[in-house]
């Protein structure tokens, strides 16, 4: 893989003086002293570890991801459409229309209106800054959202007794915000717990005091494979978090560090979480304990680890009777995952799903419990969702094993851009090209606003913020409608009817990794049989 991007990345705010860089190192072929540009090397000479992370100055108002080409992605598969008959609906041209396609799904028995859920968004500032829109948008879309790790531990208003949380204003707010518009049927709110959360007793607090039904355990992955990280921009908060047991870099209690911070040598501390060390027996016992203490359902979230860890994860999940496992493919990030880790570590999503499905085949032959699967890792649209779900139907009569796709960056983008354009509209500063096309008020430029006003009346734009309307429009009107169109093209009118025959591989690598036949191999025998007349 070419190293052309190794020395200049938009995620770190670096660039090279010339464009024809060395393909080995990414450096300018001729590096000169009198250069005013900051490449990765030169910026690292000034800012060191800061250059490992996506632009620190944008923390809380941005998301980041890999820009590496992994050589295999969802574009390496093509959807195979049909013209014959209809499955899941009467084969009547007046009835088999694409709006009639059912794109609902169930995750751990929980019905959701679209097969998209919002992955854990925890203590990172970008989640808190956009929580109202994300939570309310998920609720009115009829799907699941997860409160991520470290929320109680980061809450300055949280109260602890004997090391256990007994009150968290932030956690209570996050849950109540979702439930204000939740219909009590479609979707639910999940609370995720990592090492620190478990030590703080967050699980018992949210189950007993806040009536949370679902706990998600998290293995290792926060900022990719090294635990969750956030930036702390004031000394008092950094000191508070260290006293609560978090790892702070540099040490805010060090007088020299404090002096450097006050002088502006650096402007933020790194807060790190500890990495979990899962063991089979203790994990099974932990899940049993959770259920005994009131958890109605238990999920597990893990990252893009090596194939042996995929097998270990599913073994533990099977033994413990886990309801849902979310596997998160390499490449994404919502807070401050290190850029080199996003690019260079972990298993990319398509490869990861192939490994998960191989493990499921083995478990199925042994008659073992198989949890519902949710896949994450760079998904943004209906074609990718279609292909992942279709690929996961192994033809054993159980339908697709992937019940939904988890997203984090895409929903954040939907609400952040919705928020920005709503602010511009209020100031009369919308781009002229935009307002000329779509109007100058949110009631005009959010396509789903009329539909939601019919349901919620004046709540739209008030209790339901406009960015939540943007998220609904993205999830339901765009992705939901897009899925219906694709599925109707394949003559499938229910999501559970999608199967591996609905896609074909376009490259040898895609076929080899997933077992999906190449497009020139698809139905070759069927073609001969049809023409034998």
Image: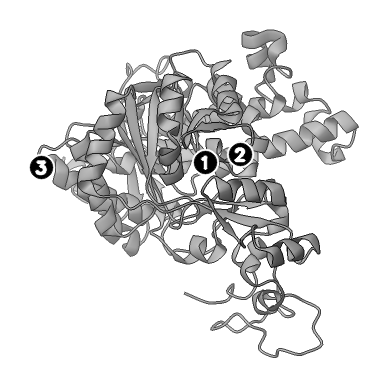
Give the foreground label among 2 and 1: 1
Q: What element carries label 1?
A: loop
Q: Determine the residue located farthest toward the left in the rendered image.
A: 366
Give the foreground label among 2 and 3: 2
Quadrant housing residue 137 = top right
Q: Mark 1 points at which residue?
A: 150
Label 2 – label 3 distance at C-alpha: 41 Å
Q: Residues within 10 Å of mark 3 (few under 14, many from 20)?
A: few
Q: How crowded is mark 2: few (under 14 residues within 10 Å), some or many (20 or more)?
A: many
Give the foreground label among 3 and 1: 1
Please give left or right for residue 184 compared with residue 431 in the image.
left
Q: Mark 3 points at which residue?
A: 365
In the rendered image, the vertical position of residue 273 relative to residue 398, given as above or below: below
In the rendered image, the vertical position of residue 141 relative to residue 264, given as above or below: above
In the rendered image, the vertical position of residue 197 relative to residue 514, given as above or below: above
Q: Which residue is nearer to you in this view: 413 or 293?
A: 293
Give the colouring mode of the picture: one colour
Q: Mark 2 points at which residue?
A: 127
Q: What element carries label 3?
A: helix
Please give left or right for residue 334 compared with residue 38 in the image.
left
Q: Earlier in the sequence, mark 3 or mark 1?
A: 1
Residue 125, percent across and down? 64, 43
Residue 152, percent across and down? 54, 35
Please give left or right for residue 9 compared with residue 531 in the image.
right
Q: Is mark 2 on a helix, strand or loop?
A: helix
Quadrant location, the C terminus: top left
User: Is residue 37 something that shows in the picture?
Assistant: yes
Label 2 – label 1 distance at C-alpha: 12 Å
Q: Which residue is nearer to you in this view: 56 or 271?
A: 271
Residue 336, percent across and down? 59, 54
Residue 260, percent across and down? 75, 66
């Amino acid at each position: 893989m070419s190293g052309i991007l190794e020395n200049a990345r938009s995620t770190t705010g670096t660039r090279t003086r010339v464009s024809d860089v060395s393909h080995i190192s990414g450096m300018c072929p001729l590096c000169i002293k009198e250069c005013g540009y900051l490449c990765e090397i030169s910026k690292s000479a000034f800012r060191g570890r800061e250059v490992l992370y996506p632009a620190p100055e944008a923390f809380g108002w941005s998301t980041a991801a890999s820009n590496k080409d992994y050589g295999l992605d969802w574009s390496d598969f093509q959807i195979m459409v049909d013209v014959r008959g209809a499955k899941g609906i009467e084969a009547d041209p007046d009835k088999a229309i694409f709006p009639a396609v059912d794109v609902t799904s169930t995750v751990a028995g929980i019905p959701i209106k679209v097969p998209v859920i919002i992955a854990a968004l925890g203590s990172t500032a970008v989640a808190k800054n956009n929580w109202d829109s994300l939570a309310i948008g998920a609720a009115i879309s009829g799907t699941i959202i997860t409160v991520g790790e470290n929320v109680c531990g980061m809450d300055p208003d949280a109260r602890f007794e004997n090391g256990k949380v007994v009150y968290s204003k932030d956690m209570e707010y996050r849950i109540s915000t979702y439930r204000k518009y939740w219909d009590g049927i479609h979707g639910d709110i999940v609370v995720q717990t990592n090492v620190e959360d478990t030590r703080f007793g967050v699980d018992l607090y949210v189950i007993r005091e806040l009536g949370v039904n679902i706990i998600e355990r998290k293995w290792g992955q926060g900022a990719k494979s090294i635990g969750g990280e956030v930036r702390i921009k004031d000394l008092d908060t950094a000191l508070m978090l260290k006293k609560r047991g978090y790892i702070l870099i540099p040490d805010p209690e060090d007088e020299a560090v404090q002096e450097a911070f006050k002088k502006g040598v650096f402007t933020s501390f790194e807060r790190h979480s500890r990495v979990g060390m899962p063991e089979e027996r203790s994990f099974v016992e932990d899940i049993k304990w959770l259920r005994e203490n009131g958890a109605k359902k238990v999920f597990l979230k893990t990252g893009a680890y090596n194939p042996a860890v995929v097998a270990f994860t599913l073994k533990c999940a099977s033994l413990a009777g886990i309801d849902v496992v979310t596997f998160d493919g390499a490449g994404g990030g919502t807070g401050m995952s290190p850029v080199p880790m996003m690019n260079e570590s972990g298993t990319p999503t398509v490869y990861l799903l192939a490994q998960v499905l191989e493990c499921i085949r083995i478990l199925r032959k042994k008659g073992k419990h198989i949890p519902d699967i949710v896949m994450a890792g760079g998904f943004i649209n209906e074609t990718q969702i279609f292909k992942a779900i279709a690929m996961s139907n192994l033809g054993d009569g159980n339908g697709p094993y992937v019940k939904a796709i988890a997203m984090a960056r895409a929903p954040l983008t939907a609400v952040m851009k919705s928020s920005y354009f709503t602010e511009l509209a209020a100031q009369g500063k919308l781009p002229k090209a935009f307002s000329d096309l779509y109007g100058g008020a949110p009631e005009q430029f959010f396509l789903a606003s009329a539909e939601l006003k019919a349901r919620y009346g004046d709540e739209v734009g008030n209790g339901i913020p406009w960015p939540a309307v943007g998220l609904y429009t993205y999830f339901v009107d765009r992705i939901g409608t897009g899925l219906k169109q694709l599925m109707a093209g394949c003559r499938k009118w229910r999501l559970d009817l999608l199967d591996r025959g609905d896609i074909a591989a376009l490259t040898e690598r895609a076929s080899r990794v997933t077992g999906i036949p190449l497009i020139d191999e698809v139905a070759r025998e069927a073609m001969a049989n049809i023409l034998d007349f």
